[in-house]
Image (cartoon, rainbow, N blue to C red):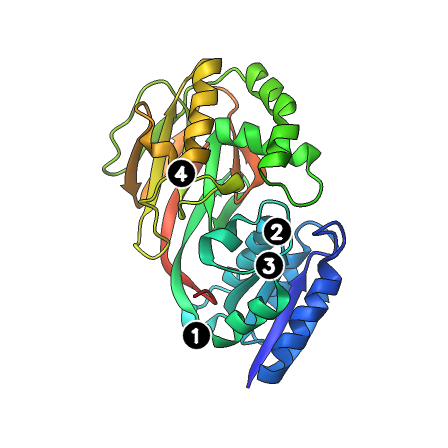
Amino acid sequence: MASWLLVVNPKSGRGSAPVRAEALAAGLEASGRVEVAMSAGRGDATRLAAGAAGEADRVVAVGGDGTLNEVLAGLLSVDEPPERIPALGFFPTGTANVAGRAFGFPADADACAGLLRSAPGRPVDVGWAGGRDGERPFLLWLGAGYDAVVIDALNRERTGRMGISGLVRRAPGVWRALSRYPSPAIAQIGDGVDPIDDVAGVIVANIGAVAFGGSVTPAADPADGVLELVRIPRAQRLELISLGARMIASHLDRHPRVRCDPVERVRLDADEPVPYHLDGEPVGTLPVDVRVGRGAIRLLAP
């Protein structure tokens, strides 16, 4: 019999996450003991997950991609091999829910409970980002420059689940943020990395999917031991629209001016302030050192 801990962001889903977490817990009870813990604010999910490392077999983040990132950070903070860390699950109740789409976690409580009960826990890669405040993990992607500006603009206005309609409603604010952004060049330094001049946006992807049903690159595989370095050149207004449309309608790396390469390590730096985010949550400004952690966590995914 398994022991479960559900780490819940009570504000997720416009406050519906606690009720949905109870429905998920009911679906898991037949497979073992289930405990539900509510986070009290930003960063608290990390503390709860770290404290459960020796108590639970499986830890499930209930919330959005940011909650999943916090729980991941807590589990990895115990510095044990993957087989001695609780397996990680996700019940998406947030706004973008990129991880739900990327890994196949359903938003229905009964369906998600069934998946989590049967999933054995497969090893997946984790990205590590070392910045001014230390090293932090990410499961989905790191974005610097253009991508971080867009994420920050959306985060300031997000309420409820955000699909294409939400992006359209928030497009004026996103456009203003991009128009004001001075687009400093981002240097890329790493083994096997061929630097490109005049890059103003970088995505280091562990998965191909991004928000709003878009895709960075189909080459990204969270079990291949590498990350995908996607580099976006400095662009004028019309070309930025073209880049965004290509990402949502197809794959960003198919744009003729976008370059994608597999990397194990890369350093991103800039002479001027360039923001970056991890899994959709703003972190700070460059520089940042990025590396892949092969099979660092067992994920309760199909």
Q: Nearer the viewer, residue 30 or 164?
A: 164
- Which residue is found at the position 65% from the left and 45% from the top? 161
Label 4 vs 3, first from the N-terminus: 3
- Which residue is found at the position 70% from the left and 33% from the top? 157
Q: Amino acid at mark 3?
A: Ala
Q: Nearer the viewer, residue 37 or 95?
A: 95
Q: Amino acid at mark 1?
A: Pro
- Which residue is found at the position 56% from the left and 75% from the top? 54
Asked if residue 123 lies left or right of residue 51, the reply is: left
Q: Position of residue 195 (x, y in %)?
A: 28, 26
Q: Position of residue 49 (x, y in %)?
A: 60, 64
Q: CA distance from mark 4 to mark 3?
A: 23 Å
Q: Amino acid at mark 4?
A: Val
- Which residue is found at the position 41% from the left and 30% from the top? 246
- Which mark is on residue 198? none
- Which mark is on residue 64? 2
Q: Is residue 235 above or below residue 23?
A: above
Q: CA distance from mark 2 to mark 1?
A: 23 Å
Q: Nearer the viewer, residue 94 or 228?
A: 94
Residue corresponding to mark 1:
120
Label 4 vs 2, first from the N-terminus: 2
Q: CA distance from mark 4 to mark 2?
A: 20 Å
Residue corresponding to mark 4:
216
Residue corresponding to mark 3:
107
Q: From where the camera sits, is residue 271 visible? A: no
Q: CA distance from mark 2 to mark 3?
A: 11 Å
From the viewer's perspective, is the residue at label 3 or at label 1 nearer? 3
Q: Amino acid at mark 2?
A: Gly
Tell me the crowding category of disc 4: few under 14, some 14 to 19, or many 20 or more residues within 10 angstroms, Cα based.
Answer: many
Q: Nearer the viewer, residue 283 or 30?
A: 30
